[in-house]
Image (cartoon, rainbow, N blue to C red):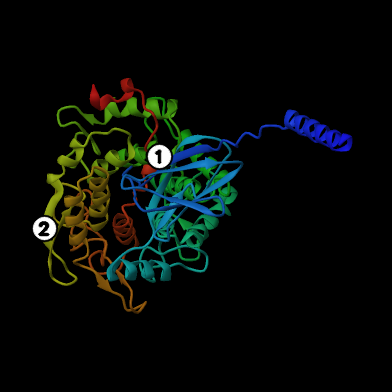
Amino acid sequence: MKFLNLFCCSFTLLLVVVGCNEEKIEPLIGYTISGKVVNIHGIGVNNVRINIGENEFVMSDAEGNWQAINLQGNILVVPADSGYLFSPDSVIVTSATNQINFIARQKRIPGMIPESMLAWLIQMQLPNGLIETGEKSNLVSLYDNSLAALTFLATGEQSKAEKIFDFFDQRIDIELLSGKGGFSQFRDANGIPSGHNWLGDNAWLLIALNNYAAMVDETRYQRLTDELANWITQLQDTDGGIWGGYTANGSQIGKITEGMIDAFNAVPGYTNFHRNLLQYFSIYRWDSTQNLLVSWPDNYYEFALDNHSWGYCGIEDFPYSVLEKTDRYINTQTATIGGLPVTGFAPDIDKDVVWLEGTGQMVIAYQKAGKFDLADFYLQEMVKPVINNTAFAGTKSLPYASNFGTGYGAEPFWTGVNTNPSTSPCTWFLMAMLQFDPLAEGYFKSIPLEDKFWLL
């Protein structure tokens, strides 16, 4: 009995000791993250899978919103949808975070015509990375190649965009920083430069590089990006305007409104460079009666179409009213290819041609403004003179213009402008099909209210 009592006492003591030393285990509290998937216009994209770590995922709702809860540790967040390219393509989180936003850019182009047009653009790329302005033209345009690079980025053809950038990246010292600086507007198919070094063309290369940095890799072409921005800012005059570059013999080119719009958008941030340029616009290039940017002051060809479209897309909070004042360019012509009536925009008030490149620019401007009925109408008009190519079987392209006429001013276009495949209208059409605004990357600059002269 004594042994039993001793055992019971010992067991009771053990329970007391264990009970006294038992530690309460608190459950781990996870953190929550949330964000939104939007297109380039800021509209939510639904039903996009957001991978959370290795084994979990959530879906974006009808407004593009998504949320993940009870997370612990370092988590890799990756949007996944084969139909889109995302910026950024992934995010690592370690604690509660809101506003993890992904920009979704449509990757696939629906329809036979755009698919065939992209196929043509791909076939046009030469071994050195460049793309000719037209088939076997032996003419390469800096502007056209910048547009082609943007189109390749928009369609997921990243390596083809890089081939274009690589060509110019290898020529920083021997071209961009040589002599008066800048890259030439034109060169032959072998890459030998000729012609003038225009501000606007170089600004478009910088715009393309800015999009690459945002979508793919912000460091790969950093030196090229920086040197281009430096060259552009050094062209600024004391009055705030920007010289248009240099001619082939080294003479300074006058101040071109459209090129200055390009430069405003292309140079990152909002600095004295941008502030002084807006002041120049307000004093020397703003028609306060019509509330429009002037292309050629005190001239019959005072206004130009691209100042409307690029001004609206390229300058933050520029008024929609500039798009409402484009009736002066709208006209209908009989297309040389196919013979159908085509309605679109001329480059100036002559209204003797439908300029397909400029019409594509207006489509993107209408998309940015949310005027999708107008955008869709002009997209359908653009494909009426589509070319079935013979050089690359099964591909399609567009001529530069629907019919033969004049460009900006009274000078006639070149022979073949209405019949030969042309790179630039194809790129604008493809970007418009994807609702890809190339100027969106440089749009938001937090311009102070007092600098927005169009509101004053």
Helix, strand or loop at mark 2:
strand
Identify the amino acid type marked 2. Answer: Thr
- Counting from the top left corner in percent of width and height, residue 84 is at 40, 56
Image disc number at residue 332: 2
Q: Residues within 10 Å of mark 2 (few under 14, many from 20)?
A: some
On screen, residue 372 above or below 12: below
Quadrant housing the N terminus: top right
Quadrant of the image occupied by residue 420: bottom left
User: In this view, which residue lies farthest toward the right?
Assistant: 3
On screen, residue 69 above or below 422: above
Which residue is drawn at the image coordinates 40% and 29% (left, top)? 274
Quadrant of the image occupied by residue 418: bottom left
Q: Which residue is mark 1?
A: 442
Which residue is drawn at the image coordinates 11% and 58% (left, top)? 332
Front residue of 190 and 44: 44
Quadrant housing the C terminus: top left
Q: Is residue 147 visible?
A: yes
- Counting from the top left corner in percent of width and height, residue 348 is at 18, 47
Q: Is residue 249 visible?
A: no
Q: Residues within 10 Å of mark 1 (few under 14, many from 20)?
A: many
Q: Earlier in the sequence, mark 2 or mark 1?
A: 2
Identify the amino acid type marked 1. Answer: Gly
